[in-house]
Amino acid sequence: MTKEGIARIVRHPLSPFKRRALFSIAILAVVMAIGTIGMMFLEGWDPVTSFYFMALLATAEGPALSPLTVAGKLFASLIAFVSIGAAISL
């Protein structure tokens, strides 16, 4: 390969690292959106409170709030596994 050919491969705009990073960001955004909408629906929280809860849940910080309904608790516990995994992969 010529020098220009190697430089083109190395500096490709969608290199495997960038592609994986964009994919991880997209997965985390989808999981956060599903979690936020789910908590709004199940707990009746406003969007900001629901997003705050999901952000703390995804980063394993430990949310300051706790769901009051059984459905909200089950949803939060299931989404915790997915959101923490998505945040770690990012």
Image (spheres, rainbow, N blue to C red):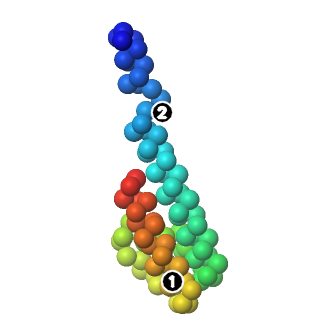
x and y percent of residue 50 in the render? 55, 73
Q: Is residue 24 above or below residue 14?
A: below
Quadrant in which the N terminus is drawn = top left
The correct choice, above or below, for 53 with respect to 10 in the image is below
Q: Residue at x 36, y 59 (%)?
A: 88
User: Disc 1 versus disc 2: distance between alpha carbons?
Assistant: 38 Å
State which quadrant residue 34 falls in.
bottom right
Q: Secondary structure at mark 2?
A: loop
Task: Judge left or right: residue 63 versus residue 35.
Answer: left
Q: Is residue 3 above or below residue 87?
A: above
- Reading the image, the residue beneath label 2 is 14
Residue 49 at least partly seen: yes
In depth, the one of 33 and 51 nearer the eye is 33
Q: Position of residue 67 (x, y in %)?
A: 51, 85
Q: Tag 2: Cα neighbours inside 10 Å, few (<14), some, or many (≥20)?
A: few
Please report the residue visible at 38 percent of the width from the left and 25 percent of the height from the top. 10
Q: Is residue 25 above or below residue 77?
A: above
User: Residue at coordinates 46% horizontally, 82% vertically from top-left?
Assistant: 65
Badge 2 amino acid: Leu
Circles 1 and 2: CB atoms closer than 8 Å: no
Residue under the image location 53 percent in, 79 percent down: 75
Residue at the disc numbered 1: 74
For badge 1, the amino acid type reads: Leu
Residue 81 point in image, percent of width and height = 42, 70
Q: Please, what secondary structure does the residue beneath circle 1 have?
A: helix
Residue that extends furthest to the front in the rendered view of this protein: 1
* Relative depth, front residue between 43 and 80: 80
Apparent side of residue 23 relative to residue 4 in the rendered image (left or right): right
